[in-house]
Image (spheres, rainbow, N blue to C red):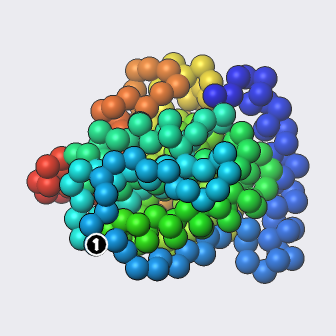
Amino acid sequence: MLRRRDLLRELGLLAGGLITAPLAAACAGRPPERLEVTPRGRADRPIAGLHPLGLGGERDGVLYVPPETHAQSPMILMLHGAGGSGRRAVRLLTPAADATGCVLLAPDSRRRTWDGVIGGFGADVRFLERALTAAFGRTTGDPRRLAVAGFSDGATYALALGRANGELFSDILAFSPGFLVPVHPTGRPRIYVSHGRSDPILPIDACSRVLVPLLRRDGYEVAYREFEGPHEVPPAVAQDAVVRFVGRSPHGTPRPQ
């Protein structure tokens, strides 16, 4: 978790990245925040539980398969906060995943936080491509029912990747995001944003109360939920966000329209 002085330093690094990232993208042709994922088959009977991704190195990540999945299970790419890990982040959504049959993929960032948050997309985007390809091959995850979610820095990164890859992600679940990273948007994914009114890490007045109106101005459908609490993801908020994405209430009953 970022302390205030760490946040200010990394925002300073971001300011430089906002200038260089568009130039780099223009030179390369394909925007660096664009994901290219090619699912290669799916497992018929995935093993339930928590599994390491096994993609090499100390920074890896985990894949969580709930006890009950379906032939075309929804999947959430869950991104941790600064200094965190996928193993810790996946716990925030595990109860909601169990209730809805949603597969969770929670990779680790290459460094202490996500590249696009501190100045430029690169190694993390490429690793997420590998992680998603591996996850689709080992589960019944449906590429047409894919959301990107995150907490804190992970939420900021999820908003960036989700907007840049709207043809891949149908939904973005952003728990206590900090700001909007400039990207080349595609599609119009649905967005869910939550934030604690007493958040001391990423104050709500400077963060979600600023970025939510900007997202709506840009034409996104945004469900916004404030709660009484600090920098956290309350279980009820996690449940609400996942149910909205999956489109049905716990235990498979249709969601009210």
Q: Secondary structure at mark 1?
A: loop
Q: Tell me which corner region of the image, top left, top right, bottom left or bottom right, holds residue 257.
A: bottom left
- Residue 232 seen from this side: yes
Instruction: Answer above or below: position of 148 versus 87.
Output: below
Amino acid type assigned to the residue bearing label 1 in the image = Asp
Residue visible at 75% across and 61% down in the picture: 122
Q: In the image, residue 15 lies at what x, y percent?
A: 84, 46
The residue pinned by badge 1 equals 44
The vertical placement of 5 against 236, above or below, is above
Q: Return the x and y of residue 149 as percentages of the image width and height.
A: 48, 50
- In the shown orientation, is residue 245 left or right of residue 115? left
Quarter of the image for residue 246 reads: bottom left
Name the residue nearer the viewer: 3 or 54.
Answer: 54
Q: Nearer the viewer, residue 89 or 235?
A: 89
Judge the density around disc 1: few (<14), some (14-19), many (≥20) Cα neighbours within 10 Å: few
> Does 4 appear above or below 87?
above
Q: Nearer the viewer, residue 239 or 86?
A: 86
Residue furthest to the left in view is: 253
Q: Position of residue 175 (x, y in %)?
A: 48, 39
Quarter containing the N terminus: top right
Give me the residue at 53% from left, 43% from top: 86
- Give the side of residue 87 with respect to residue 42, left or right: right
Q: Give residue 69's quadrant in the image.
A: bottom left
Q: Position of residue 155 (x, y in %)?
A: 56, 44
